[in-house]
Image (spheres, rainbow, N blue to C red):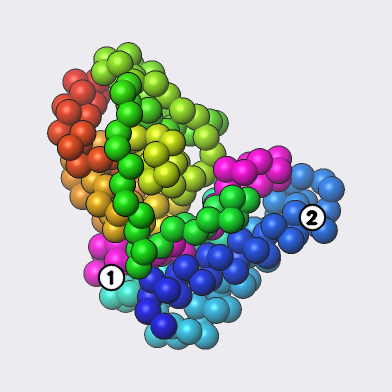
Amino acid sequence: MTDADLARRLASEAGKLLLALRETGPADPAALGDLGDRASNDLLMAALRRERPDDAILSEEEADDHGRLAARRVWLVDPLDGTREYRERRDDWAVHVALAIDGRIADGAVAQPALDQCFCTARPPALPPQATPLRIAVSRSRPAVIAANLAAAIGAVLVPMGSAGVKTLAVLRGEADVYLHQGDMYEWDSGAPAAVAQAAGLAVSHLDGRPVRFNQARPITPDILICHPAAQAGLLAAIAALL
């Protein structure tokens, strides 16, 4: 099984588990979120250790083993991206499984179980055309500080939603044109979205245009911009004027 196919299979399986738990699990939202995080992580960690025993893993729900810094291949796992949305029984939560090789994103999958969808690097979708005005997907709980000013400057509209993965899938489905995040997020948040976006032909960078690197000693992605390649230069210039 290829790395991309493995990522897709595991993200889909974890998503089905999370949907089942939401039907049968505790009524208390906090308890449901904790159970979902734990159960999905257990499934993903067991499967990766079985299928790729020589690879390192960086998961939100595991203590960081810094031995990963010496590894060429590192899996980036977010068992439940958007725990708040999951426990509120919304649709905008996801499962992230991605692989970085030598610090660069290589393969991955983002599942949005509530919509029965999983996007992976092996079968990227055709990019939909951009809309006018541009629609920028931003966090519903902590939107980028510059988001409102950027939208005003370029005549765009903001589309708030949960989960970094869901925001990226929104661009791939044509429900948004840009995903903008400003403020630290972890590599397990950004890895799988970057993988599926890149495979589909979207541009992925930091807000200053630098490429996004993974398996860093401090596994943080301070910001990210995902957009159509044709829009990247204009967006980066507009962002630079605001920073």
Which residue does the numbered mark 1 point to in the structure image? 101
- Relative to 34, is 64 on the left or the right? left
**Residue 91 lies in the magenta-colored region:** yes
Q: Quadrant of the C terminus?
A: top left
Q: Nearer the viewer, residue 31 or 228?
A: 228
| Distance Cα–Cα, label 1 vs label 2 | 37 Å
Which residue does the numbered mark 2 point to in the structure image? 23
Q: Residue at x 36, y 64 (%)?
A: 123
Three-letter amino acid code at disc 1?
Ile
Q: Is residue 73 visible?
A: yes
Which quadrant of the structure image shows residue 42? bottom right
- Relative to 7, is 156 on the left or the right? left
Three-letter amino acid code at disc 2?
Glu
**Residue 103 vertical position relative to residue 163 in the rendered view, above or below:** below
**Residue 166 vertical position relative to residue 11 in the rendered view, above or below:** above
Label 1 or label 2, whichever comes before in sequence order: 2
Q: Position of residue 180 (x, y in %)?
A: 36, 35
Q: Which residues are the magenta region?
A: 83-109
Q: Residue at x 56, y 60 (%)?
A: 79
Q: Position of residue 133 (x, y in %)?
A: 32, 21
**Residue 15 lies in the magenta-colored region:** no
Q: Position of residue 53 (x, y in %)?
A: 45, 85
Q: What kind of element bears circle 1? A: strand
Q: Quadrant of the N terminus?
A: bottom left
Proximity of marks 1 and 2: CB atoms separated by less than 8 Å: no
- Relative to 31, is 208 on the left or the right? left
How many numbered dots are placed on residues in this image? 2
Q: Position of residue 61 (x, y in %)?
A: 57, 61
**Residue 157 vertical position relative to residue 61 in the rendered view, above or below:** above
Dot 2: within a 10 Å radius of its alpha carbon, few (fewer than 14), some, or many (20 or more) residues?
A: few
